[in-house]
Amino acid sequence: MSSSSHSARLGVNSARLGVNSAMKFANTSRAPHLHPLLLLLHNLLHHNHHNPHHHHHHKTIRLFFELSPFDSSPTPITSTNENSIYENGIQTQIYLHSHVLHRSKYFSALLSDRWQTQSQTQKPLKLNLGIPPTPASLQSYITVFELLYTPDLSNSIDSVSTALDLLPIALELLFEDLVKSCVTYLESVPWTEAEEQRVLSIVPFLKQDESQELLSRLSAPTESDTSEEMLHSLVSSAINTYPNMAFVKAFVAKLLRDYSSRESAKRVLEAEFEKCIGVVKESLEDYSSPDFRGDHNETEAIQRLNLHKAMTNGKHLLWLIERMIELRVAYFAVKAWSEQASFTADLQRAFRDDAWRNIVPGLPAVVLRCTSKLANAVAAGIILATKQVRKKLVKEWLPVLIVCKDNVSPMSPSNKSLYLELEETFLRIISTLPMSDSQELLQQCLSFSTRNVDDCPHLLTAFNTWFRRAARPPQTDDLY
């Protein structure tokens, strides 16, 4: 070998098949049988290079891409130009200096005394490295061999795809400097979803200290459900931090719809529902039973604060109820809403008073919208509530509707539409109850009637249905 080849960083024997031709052949139909990469470690010394009695010579590594004796195909190779080239053993050769190979612990071990006998040091040592039969794979190996000559690898990786192509080879060859460089790059930049999947497939082959930063991005550090905690924080922020920003609520609503675990979303929404309804109930209770022992102005200020807290958290409740219905996880809310005897009593007392009108004029509408949303979901079969829950829902909230109709004036068109919708929904739910229960509740609905009987067809239909059923002969269990 000439001295010029010793000094070359990476040489390709132009008399042999060129790299481009080798890559071209890698895509032929016989490539799977021809893919092994043969590395020949050619020792130019007759003795150990540490022997002080001999001059230092370079060991070289020659890279061949050729038919392996381990993978020979029983099928005869057809006579084409490309196949004939391989049949004749014309290959690409890459020459590398042996002293740089010691950067790779894999090659360093192969070049050590314990792996070479006297006879092996006088002839090439062959080993078989299988690589995928694609031009990209071959080029990645060549790039790794080039980087053996680069002292500082800090700027050698310029893209995620490059890092992911080279890292498995660096791991295979135990090229620790390149492994570190690839991992450092991957830790510092964003990935696409496809790239993330490749990172996940490589992480198991990294040492713990190498994979720690990557894993911290890929998964939660503890066994606690951090996804649910994150979702809870987002929902809480949407209703508390950005209460008047509709686009934030719309964005969180989409996250809830797309969230993979409906059970987790259910738990998050139920927890926030309990929190909000607790605040509304407490505020109305304090408003309905004020402490007059203090200064009059101070008491009035506290009353105003109580009503504003009830109004704000009532809006939160409405948004939460809409999300729960949308995800079909609202049974908890319906059941809780049907068990609010003291809350509905406080609302009736508050709405009979005129003080709230100038402070929170929209409070009755917010409360009744919450009721209407839940009642509509029950009547439509979106929420399959039990008979007891259906009955209590109407029984507890029907008086609130009646008080609002009697005391909220003048009645705006939107309120009139809301009241009518809730009336119709309550009557539909009453029609699902046993005759004795529906008889009791229908009598409380007489206030739904209007000056013109033709303006309340929903009430007329409900009573006609009840009387039709009442006139029907008893149905026995005996079918014979």
Image: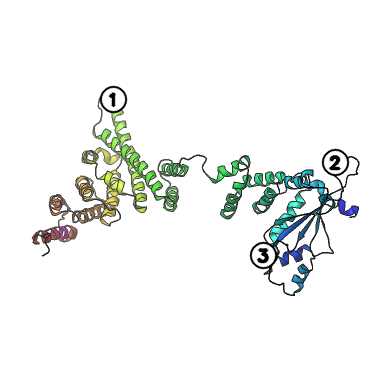
Q: Viewer-proximal residue, 54 or 323?
A: 54
Residue pointed to by mark 3: 32
Q: Quadrant of residue 303?
A: top left
Left or right of 45? Residue 106 is left
The stretch of residues the image draws in magenta is 459-463
Which SS class for mark 1?
A: loop
Eye-nearest disc, 2 or 3: 2
The secondary structure that most of the magenta stretch takes on is: helix
Residue pointed to by mark 1: 295
- At which x and y percent is residue 185? 66, 46
Q: Earlier in the sequence, mark 1 or mark 2?
A: 2
- At which x and y percent is residue 299? 29, 29
Q: Earlier in the sequence, mark 2 or mark 3?
A: 3
Q: How many marks?
A: 3
Q: Viewer-proximal residue, 276 or 105?
A: 105
Left or right of 302? Residue 111 is right
Q: Is residue 414 magenta?
A: no
What is the number of the mark on residue 398?
Answer: none
Left or right of 195? Residue 79 is right
Residue flagged by tag 2: what amino acid is it? His
Q: As drawn, which residue projects farthest toward the bottom?
A: 79
Mark 3 and mark 1: Cα distance apart in space:
92 Å
Q: Residue at x 24, y 41 (%)?
A: 340
Quarter of the image with the C terminus is bottom left
